Image (tube, rainbow, N blue to C red):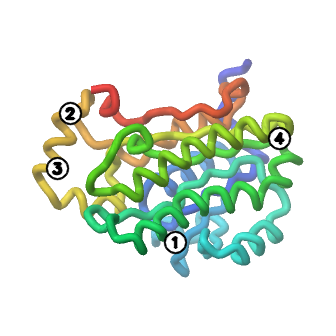
Amino acid sequence: MNPDSVFNFSSRNVLVVGASRAGIGSAIAASFKAGGADVTITGVEPEPAEADRGRYRYMQINVTDASDIADLAAETDELDVLVNCAAITSRGEEMDPEFFGKVIDVNLEGTFRMSSAFLEHLKRSQGNVINIASMYASFGSPMNPAYGASKAAVRQLTKSLAMAWAQFNIRVNCIAPGFIITEQSAKSRTNSSHVEAVNARTPMGRWGAPEDLAGPALFLASPAASFMTGTCLSVDGGYSVA
């Protein structure tokens, strides 16, 4: 294997779902673009974050809307890599049954809807699916029970799709981030004691940056991971093993 070509994604088509705001999705999209890929991003907002306007093809879709997804699939000619990043959470509000259901609909069912909609594209390209799970897939969260449940299910869905789609030479893997500095985590980071507790427990002593997830995503989509499927990579600074 030529090391210089491993992360060369020229002529590859990548779709990053849930990349309209500053965060994990946008960092992953930027890294694929830097590797030469033709990148499309999606979000529920009419436009992506200002820094990303004009950098990518942008499609406004709601992952809970089957017609939105079907339209996007119909408009997409080729796809090599699907990255499912769309997710919602709200610390301290997730015991409400209605909101709990909404989180499951976006985080879990949205991931399944997107993956299923692009199955035929991925068959043709013998492509990759990368799902974003969470360290909360492995242990409980009293403040984010819906998020934790949805991400545990995403991890299990990853394993099941990996088994089902291996016959098509489609690889399905996931990444489990730890505490990452994003717009989504802004609410929790207003609690200084929570921030300090995370830093104290994390062996690397800090919260992660969105860019910390980009390298693992590129790796999973690359020939370097050609014999990996159904895997979930923890990217949490050691938090889950502390």
| First along the sequence among labels 3 and 1 | 1
Give the image quarter of residue 218: top right
| Above or below, comparing residue 220 to residue 13 in the picture | above
Circle 2 or circle 1, nearest the eye: 2
Quadrant containing the N terminus in the rendered view:
top right
| Mark 2: amino acid | Arg
Alpha carbon separation for disc pair 2 and 1 = 34 Å
Alpha carbon separation for disc pair 4 and 1 = 29 Å
| Mark 1: amino acid | Pro
Q: Which residue is labeled 4 in the image? A: 126
Alpha carbon separation for disc pair 2 and 4 = 40 Å
| Mark 4: amino acid | Gln
Q: What residue do we see at 29% from left, 62% from top?
A: 91
Quadrant containing the C terminus in the rendered view:
top left
Q: Secondary structure at mark 4?
A: loop
| First along the sequence among labels 3 and 2 | 3
* Residue 117 image offset from top left, x and y in percent: 76, 61
Alpha carbon separation for disc pair 4 and 3 = 43 Å
The answer to whether residue 35 is seen in the rendering is yes
Q: Who is closer to the viewer here, 149 or 135? A: 149
Q: Are marks 4 and 1 in contact (CB under 8 Å)?
A: no
| First along the sequence among labels 4 and 3 | 4
Residue furthest right as drawn: 124
Q: Are marks 2 and 4 in contact (CB under 8 Å)?
A: no
Q: Which residue is labeled 2 in the image? A: 201
Q: Which residue is labeled 3 in the image? A: 194
| Mark 3: amino acid | His
Residue furthest left as drawn: 193
Q: Are marks 3 and 1 in contact (CB under 8 Å)?
A: no
Q: Which residue is labeled 1 in the image? A: 48
Q: Are marks 3 and 2 in contact (CB under 8 Å)?
A: no
Q: Who is closer to the viewer here, 84 or 64? A: 64
